[in-house]
Image: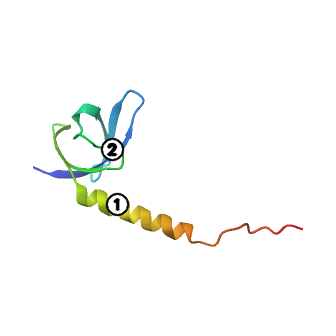
Amino acid sequence: MILYQAVFDRISDNNKAVLLVEGLNQEYVIDLLLLPSGAKPNDWFEIDIENNRIVEMRFDSQKTDETKHKINKQMNRIRTLKKGSKFKRK
């Protein structure tokens, strides 16, 4: 059994969950009901794939928290950059 990391990317127009799988560079579209309860976009999962189907899925709280922390850190860095226009008024 090979476990892959997948992120819940978005909900498509037809109420399906779109998962992006690292390592395979593939996108899987599944019913929202197949996700663990409380799952939301940007959550990470460990998944097992057999015959090109997801057969098992577990929420990866550590990867989810690490990613959120990394994004927050980057956003805070961007917010602290010098503000204001480079162009001077005459």
- The quarter in which the C terminus is drawn is bottom right
At numbered mark 2, what does the secondary structure look like: helix, strand or loop? loop
Q: Amino acid at mark 1?
A: Thr
Q: Residue at x 30, y 56 (%)?
A: 64
Say whether residue 38 is left or right of residue 85. left
Q: Is residue 1 left or right of residue 53?
A: left
Q: Residues within 10 Å of mark 1 (few under 14, many from 20)?
A: some
Q: Residue furthest top?
A: 14
Residue 17 at x, y percent in the picture: 32, 36
Point out residue 74 in the picture as x, y percentages from the top left corner. 46, 66
Is 48 rendered above or below residue 87? above
Q: Nearer the viewer, residue 89 or 55?
A: 89
Furthest residue toward left: 1
Q: Mark 2–mark 1 contact, CB under 8 Å?
A: no
The residue pinned by badge 2 equals: 40
At 66% across and 69% down in the image, what residue appears?
A: 83
Q: Quadrant of residue 16?
A: top left
Q: Residue at x 43, y 63 (%)?
A: 72
Q: Nearer the viewer, residue 30 or 74?
A: 74
